[in-house]
Amino acid sequence: MSSAENCQKQRSGASARTTPHRVLHIVENLDRGAVENWLVRTFVESRQQFPSLEWTFYCTLGRPGKLDTIVREHGGRIIYAPVGIARTVKFLRHLRNTLRMGNYDILHCHHDFMSGLYLLAAWGLPIKKRLVHIHNTDEALPTPSVFKRRLALEPLRQCCLHLADGIVGISGHVLQQFMRGRQRGPSRDQLLYYGVDPKPFRKCKPQRDALRGELGLPSDATVLLFVGRMTPLKNPTFVVEMLASILPHVPSAYAVFVGSGDLSDLVELEAQSLGVKERIRMLGWRDDTAELMANSDLFVFPRLEHPKEGLGLVVVEAQAAGLPMLLSPGIPEDAVVVPELFNTLPLSLGPGKWAEKATGILSQERIKQTRALERVAGSRFSMTRSVHDLMQLYNFSDVPDPIRSEMVA
């Protein structure tokens, strides 16, 4: 048998296997969301080890995102939905046609309850594995109507539970809440923790003066950092109230907000009313979060306690930066990697008590950033482990590398 014939035989054997080769991820769009950022990082990380797995991202918002270029540079495909999900029938028709024409082996849905609709669109198609990935506990749907949301939530959840081949949670709390008492199947319903890319944190350098100069702060400024969407659930206005309370104890305190959302203007109005407008900085979304964390003094995250955060990836990242944290109990225990950095306080105690707690934390000696980073990098949030666990979900660990097969032939 010639080398060419042998190579062709190996390719044919691999393609005849039941192990999947093509996956369609359904996301909003490849932009600022924690889900999409983790997913794209995982995609890039997996390309060298699993080059024969083809990734396609179906963006339901139908518009480009800042991560599109990275995906295309690494060989991924992007499909934009031509109509919004509000035009449900046309949306699902296009999605079904996309699934049928693409011959996908895996459908990986990332929209919690809404994934039930995507599973209905895939009904009867020869897809080997259908996964529903639960990233949040908010039980939100894209409708302003409370009545419609209550009416649709349970049927959509049942679609997910009965039509999916696997339910994947980003934390034990998320998975338990979505299952609502239904017994977990050990091979069907699993945890998959986000992988944190350690490279940006390893590159961080102590640049306190430079950061404060960039932000127009005094060189001795004590920076309280908030990172997240400016929404009621994330509770950013509480940080402003805490700032006003801490100033008599820590006169050098300033609050820096990274993120945007509906409450951005309210944060500024609250700061104005409390007389601390000059003490806050609104940065919007940034790409240098690791540097900001490494050169701040305290990470403040007063997330509402009910419902809890799905995981809190920024909390894990703050630990990778060695940044002490003051958090509400709205963060699940899964996110704890470096307990020395973890401090929680109920929101019911109010911003005054939070200011007292923060003052005490700021007076303590910090652990070394390199030590904290290595603990995160070696934890369940390791990027290598995250990629491995995802490939295990795809049953992809035994698929031969076609490039290596070609070299052997």
Image: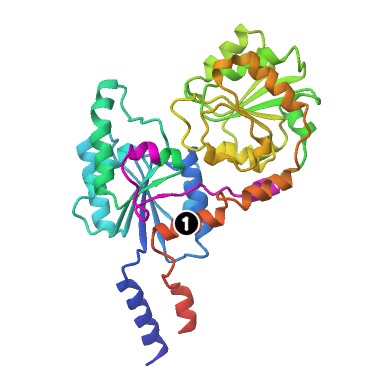
Residue tagged by mark 1?
A: 389
Q: In the rendered view, how is the structure colored? A: rainbow
- Residue drawn at the location 56% of the way across and 53% of the way down: 383
Quarter of the image with the N terminus is bottom left
Whether residue 61 is visible here, answered yes or no, is no
Residue occupying the point 40% across, 82% down: 7
Q: What amino acid type is highlighted by mark number 1?
A: Asp
- Crowding at label 1, few (<14), some or many (≥20) Cα neighbours within 10 Å? some
Range shown magenta: 176-203
| Left or right side of 43 for 153 | left
> In the displayed structure, would residue 48 be above or below residue 220?
below
Depth check: 372 or 47 in front?
Answer: 372
Direction from residue 189 to residue 122 in the image, left or right: left
Quarter of the image for residue 372 reads: top right
- Residue 129 in the magenta stretch? The answer is no
Residue 375 x/y as whole percent: 66, 49
**Residue 133, located in which quarter of the rendered image?**
top left
Q: Residue at x 42, y 88 (%)?
A: 3
Q: Main secondary structure of the magenta part?
A: loop
Q: Secondary structure at mark 1?
A: helix
Say if residue 294 shows up in the picture.
yes
240 relative position to 29: left or right: right
**376 lies above or below 177:** below
Residue 263 location (% of width, % of height): 50, 19
